[in-house]
Structures are given as C-alpha cells and as structure tokens.
Image: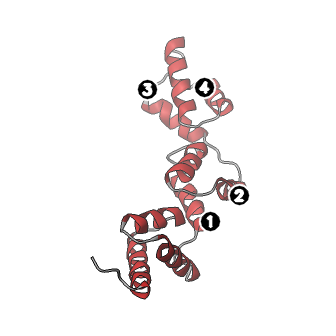
Amino acid sequence: MQERPREVQLRDAKLKALHILERMDRTEAQLREKLSDAGFEEEPVEEAVDYVKSYGYIDDERYVRSYITYRSDQKSRRQLMQELRFKKGVPAELIEQVCEELGPADERPLIRRFLEKKQYHGAEADDAQRERLIAALVRRGFSMSDILAVLREDF
C-alpha cells in the first residue's frame, strides 16, 4: 500500500475530526481516540485536535460543565466525576475546578427518588433492607451524611 503524503493525511484527519464533532460534542481524549481508531498517526491526530480547538469546536471545560449540569438530576456528583475522568478522559484537576465553580450539589432529591423507586418505607423496613439500600446508594456515589439525613426524614 502506498504511503499518503503528510498534507493529505493532515487534511483527512481534520475533516474526520470535524465529521466526528458534528454529530455530538466530545472531549479531547475521545476525539484523539476516535482519530487513532480511524487509522491516523499521532502527528496528524494532534494537529487535527489543535485545529478544532482553535475554532472552539472542542473545549473540555465546557464539556465538563454541561455534562455535570445536565446529568446532575440523574446521578451523584461523584459518579459523574468518575465517568468524566475514566470514560471521557478528562483530567481530574479540570473536573475539580469546574465542580468548585458550580458549587455543592444537593443530592437528597436523588436519594429520595431512589428510595421511592425501591419502595422503601422506613417504618416497615428491617435492618437488612436498610443496609442494602445504604450500600447501594454509597456505590452510586452519594455521601453517607446525605443518605442518613434522608433516611432520618421518616421516609
């Protein structure tokens, strides 16, 4: 197979990056991965990422802010932070910075909704059921203080 000239590889990488981003927003790490998976070498990938960044088509801070804002009524802040870091490839420092700017999240309504879904009734529940629900909520990233506060509300 014949090697393509560098200029052609770079042009194709830029076009592929734009095509990937026209369907949905992505993080830098996700875009790099998609371009690498498409067979582009490291240098054209980096130049294509820099190209789309220069036009503001990719911005990890904006991505983190919107990801947390639009999903905070579905998942705990800790769970969203884990997804951003390990699934989306966003640096932990950036996630922490955005979370500080957004301020603390009141996750108690999410905990109440979870307990309603599991048909938890405090007066009727035994210790084993209560412990299972607490463990499930902790696994979902909720703080123990919020969990206990909701359970004390005589839910």
* Rendered position, 64 above or below 123: below
- Tell me if label 1 and label 2 are in contact, CB under 8 Å: yes
User: Of label 3 and label 2, which has the lower sequence position?
Assistant: 2
Q: Secondary structure at mark 3?
A: loop
59 sits left or right of 32 in the view: right
**Residue named by callout 2:** 97
- Going by the numbered disc 1, the residue's amino acid type is Glu
Can residue 126 be seen at all in this image of the molecule? no
Can residue 118 be seen at all in this image of the molecule? yes
User: Of label 4 and label 1, which has the lower sequence position?
Assistant: 1
Whole-angstrom CA distance, mark 3 to mark 4, is: 13 Å
Mark 3, residues whose alpha carbon is within 10 Å: few (<14), some, or many (≥20)? few
User: Of label 1 and label 2, which has the lower sequence position?
Assistant: 1
Whole-angstrom CA distance, mark 3 to mark 2, is: 37 Å
- Tell me if label 4 and label 1 are in contact, CB under 8 Å: no
Q: Secondary structure at mark 1?
A: helix
Mark 1, residues whose alpha carbon is within 10 Å: few (<14), some, or many (≥20)? some
What's the residue at 58%, 58% (across, down)?
A: 90
- Going by the numbered disc 3, the residue's amino acid type is Gln
Question: Of tags 1 and 3, which is closer to the observer?
Answer: 1
User: Of label 1 and label 3, which has the lower sequence position?
Assistant: 1
Mark 4, residues whose alpha carbon is within 10 Å: few (<14), some, or many (≥20)? some
**Residue named by callout 4:** 151
Whole-angstrom CA distance, mark 4 to mark 1, is: 35 Å
Q: Which mark is residue 61?
A: 1
Question: Of tags 4 and 2, which is closer to the observer?
Answer: 2
**Residue named by callout 3:** 119
